[in-house]
Amino acid sequence: PVAAEDQKFCLKEVLDTFKLCLSENKEVYLEHYVAGWRGLVRFLNSLGSVFGFISKDAVKKIQILVAFLNDENGSQYVTIQSMVKYELENELVDLTKCGKYPESGCRTLLRLHRALRWLELFLERLRTSTEDSKTSVMCAEAYNESLAQHHIWMIRKAANLSFCMLPGRPAFFEVMNVGPPEQVLAMLGEAIPLISEVYQITEALYAQHNLLDLP
Ligand code: 1PW
């Protein structure tokens, strides 16, 4: 059998997964959030081996969260809201410095959450780009505006180096596997607001509980 990470990426699939993330009362299902990330990892992997170092950490974070979901307390991890409540009430989170819980669900998800903002900014640039826009520049701008603030110098350096290896806009659209450019742009127009809403809801939840700077 082929590992999930090796299957061909299709943007539509990821879009559908993020659609499933939100419950009726606007809670975020962890299972679908993680599935959305699996899709993004497939995407990164199809961009080339340079992105291995980027996707490797995302895969590690996904695995930590999946382990919580499959654990005996998995029912506490159904939504991000229930996870935050459960981990805080049971003091399962290192709030100010690394201690007993270096891999809490809260701090692990925060890393993916920050990366989701990068993705949102990048896709928005892609959506409004013109034929001669450079994907490497759009990606670097989105990164430096968001995720970079949370990374040490070494990672920032490595990330900016790997952006230079991104395929150009036409090849990039090709990898998305959606169809002709017009269709890619329409897809992006649909996907971005969804990703944005999931991001905003998570951001508000983390802000409300003072969790935005978890070590
Ligand atoms: C082209 C579109 C890409 C969207 C996918 C974004 C994936 C983001 C992963 C960046 C990872 C860079 C290398 C790892 C850095 C970790 O130190 C960092 N992890 C993340 C996800 O930012 C922080 O995690 P840590 O070290 O505090 O456990």
Image (tube, rainbow, N blue to C red):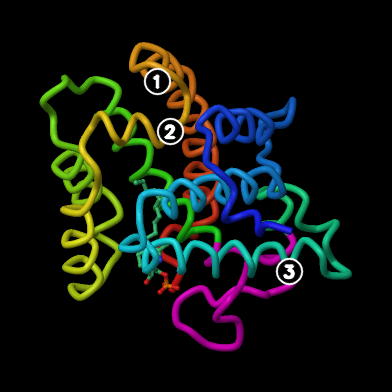
In three-dimensional space, the C-alpha distance between marks 2 and 3, rounded to whole angstroms, equals: 29 Å
Residue nearest the viewer, comparing 68 with 53: 53
Q: Amino acid at mark 3?
A: Ala
Q: Which residue is mark 3?
A: 67
Mark 1 Cα-neighbour bin, 10 Å: few <14, some 14–19, many ≥20: many
Whether pointer 2 and pointer 1 mark residues with C-beta atoms closer than 8 Å, the reply is yes
Secondary structure beneath disc 2?
A: helix
At x 64%, y 47%, the residue is 35
Whether pointer 2 and pointer 3 mark residues with C-beta atoms closer than 8 Å, the reply is no
Secondary structure beneath disc 1?
A: helix
In three-dimensional space, the C-alpha distance between marks 1 and 3, rounded to whole angstroms, equals: 34 Å
Q: Amino acid at mark 1?
A: Val
Q: Which mark is residue 176?
A: 2
Q: Position of residue 135 (x, y in %)?
A: 20, 38
In three-dimensional space, the C-alpha distance between marks 2 and 1, rounded to whole angstroms, equals: 8 Å
Secondary structure beneath disc 3?
A: helix
Tell which tag, 2 or 3, sits nearer the viewer. 2
Q: Please tell me whether the stretch drawn in magenta is mainly helix, strand or loop.
A: loop
Judged from this view, the residue extending furthest toward the right is: 72
Magenta span covers which residues? 86-108
At x 20%, y 54%, the residue is 165
Above or below, 147 against 123 in this view is: below
Residue nearest the viewer, comparing 194 with 63: 63
Whether pointer 1 and pointer 3 mark residues with C-beta atoms closer than 8 Å, the reply is no
